[in-house]
Image: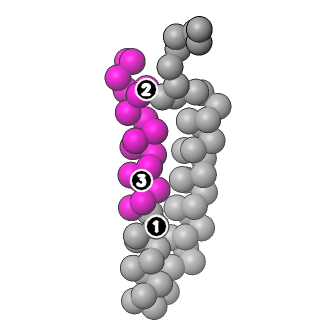
Amino acid sequence: MQQNARSAPTVAVVVSMVFGLVVALLAVLGSEWLTVVALVGGVLVGVMWAVLGLTGAGRSREPRP
């Protein structure tokens, strides 16, 4: 479980980057789906980051000296 908590921020960064690339690609292609993908994806990515921030995933559980 400890390793999953540490890899969660890395997964969040990768998901955010892929989302950005998809939105950029749709914008360049002039797709009609751009607005839908941007809204839904933005909400999902935002919720993902909020959950990571609230749960403290990826932070060290050891006390600081």
**Sequence-earlier tag: 1 or 2:** 2
Cα distance between the residues tagged 1 and 2: 24 Å
Q: Which residues are magenta?
A: 1-18
Q: Where is residue 38? Give x, y as percent.
A: 55, 70
Name the residue located 47 percent from the left edge and 84 percent from the top edge: 27
Find residue 28 and name its label. Answer: none
Q: In the figure, residue 55 lies in which quadrant? A: top right
Front-most of residues 58 and 19: 58
Residue at the spot of label 2: 5
58 over 18 or under it: above or below: above
Q: State whether residue 32 appears in this view.
A: yes
Cα distance between the residues tagged 1 and 3: 9 Å
Q: In the figure, residue 39 lies in which quadrant? A: bottom right
Residue at the spot of label 1: 20
Callout 2: helix, strand or loop? helix
Callout 1: helix, strand or loop? helix
Callout 3: helix, strand or loop? helix
